[in-house]
Image (cartoon, rainbow, N blue to C red):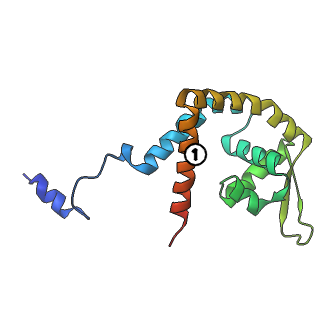
Amino acid sequence: MDDPSAKDARRPGSGPRPAPVSRALPMLLLRAREAVLEPARPILRRHDLTEPQWRVLRTLDVDGEMETTRLSQAASLHAPSVTRIMRDLSAKGYVARKAGPRDGRVVMVAITPAGHAVVAEVWPQVLQLAARLRAAYGEAAMQELEKRLARLIETAESRD
């Protein structure tokens, strides 16, 4: 029978055993994301929206018309996903696409009145969920978490 310490010695970067996967930062961030978003999904489903579609609508509602490349960045979505989402939201009448004013290859996207209407209907419900979470977690703790997450993102994105 193999000696367990011998297995550890053969493991790359052997040393202390790593924390369980469930406690790894990427897994904790994924679980936190799911825990925060799960209560909103039934609201979005009632309006025939996916979470990425909702992010696009909210981004356009707040920031106005923009190029799809900028929208991709602002909504934290991959460009191919934005293309598919634009097709679906356009079919629902929630967004309108047009060629850029200076370059016809650039696609501009804007939210339509129907898109504004669905955001106006969904947003108060989503705000209620967010308010309940903030109250349960604590306003000061939430502000500190948001600040620390923004700093973590900055640190991770600065590829020195």
- Left or right: residue 103 versus residue 4 is right
Q: What residue type is labelled 1?
A: Glu
Which residue is more in the foreground, 76 or 95?
76
Residue 76: percent from left, percent from top: 65, 54
SS state under label 1 = helix
Residue 7 quadrant = bottom left
Q: Residue drawn at (89%, 45%), measured in percent from left and top?
A: 112
Where 67 sits versus 44, above or below? below
Q: How many other residues sit within 10 Å of disc 1, few (<14), some (14-19) or many (≥20)?
A: few
Where 51 sits versus 68, above or below? above
Q: Residue drawn at (53%, 37%), measured in percent from left and top?
A: 141
Identify the residue at the far front of this view: 140
The residue singled out by tag 1 in the image is: 146
Which residue is more in the foreground, 81 or 152?
152
Which residue is more in the foreground, 3 or 138?
138
Q: Residue drawn at (12%, 59%), measured in percent from left and top?
A: 6
Q: Residue drawn at (84%, 47%), measured in percent from left and top?
A: 90
Residue 38: percent from left, percent from top: 58, 33
Residue 9 quadrant = bottom left
- Left or right: residue 114 versus residue 123 is right
